[in-house]
Image (spheres, grey):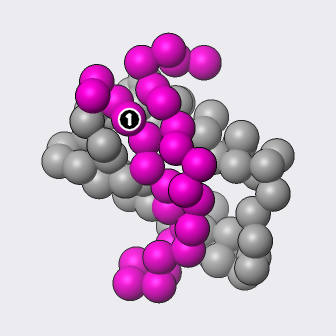
Amino acid sequence: MNQGILFNDDLAFDSKYGAWCFTVLLSAETITVYFHSMQLNRLEEIDSCTKFDLEEVVELWLEKNEPEGNTIHIQMS
């Protein structure tokens, strides 16, 4: 786990973007991460195991990418 990332417990479905999202604190900046996935969009609720998997996806994304602004959109299959 990257110690520079703090995951907030605010996972919710954002109907504006049609995606599940939560916020993270990265270098004292709040960033909203959106997960675009047909499979996730079918869920009414996301359990803690899936949330942990999404946190890992964010960590892997941040290893390869730099956020531009205060949002990250991750396309998932």
Residue 45 sits in quarter: bottom right
Q: Is residue 25 magenta?
A: yes
Q: Residue at x 42, y 18 (%)?
A: 4
Which amino acid, by three-letter code, is at mark 1? Answer: Leu
Q: Judge whether 1 appears above or below 69 on screen.
A: above
Q: Residue at x 56, y 74 (%)?
A: 13
Q: Which residue is mark 1?
A: 25
Report the quarter where the C terminus lies: bottom right
Taking the view exactly as shown, the residue that stands out farthest to the bottom is 15
Residues rendered magenta in the picture? 1-28
Q: Is residue 7 magenta?
A: yes
Bin the neighbour count of mark 1 within 10 Å (Cα to Cα): few under 14, some 14-19, many 20 and up: some
- The picture places residue 76, in percent across and down from the top left corner, at 57, 58
Instruction: Label 1: state its secondary structure.
Output: strand
Residue 16 sits in quarter: bottom left
Asked if residue 70 lies left or right of residue 63, the reply is left
Asked if residue 3 lies left or right of residue 37, the reply is left
Taking the view exactly as shown, the residue that stands out farthest to the left is 69
- The picture places residue 59, in percent across and down from the top left corner, at 52, 30
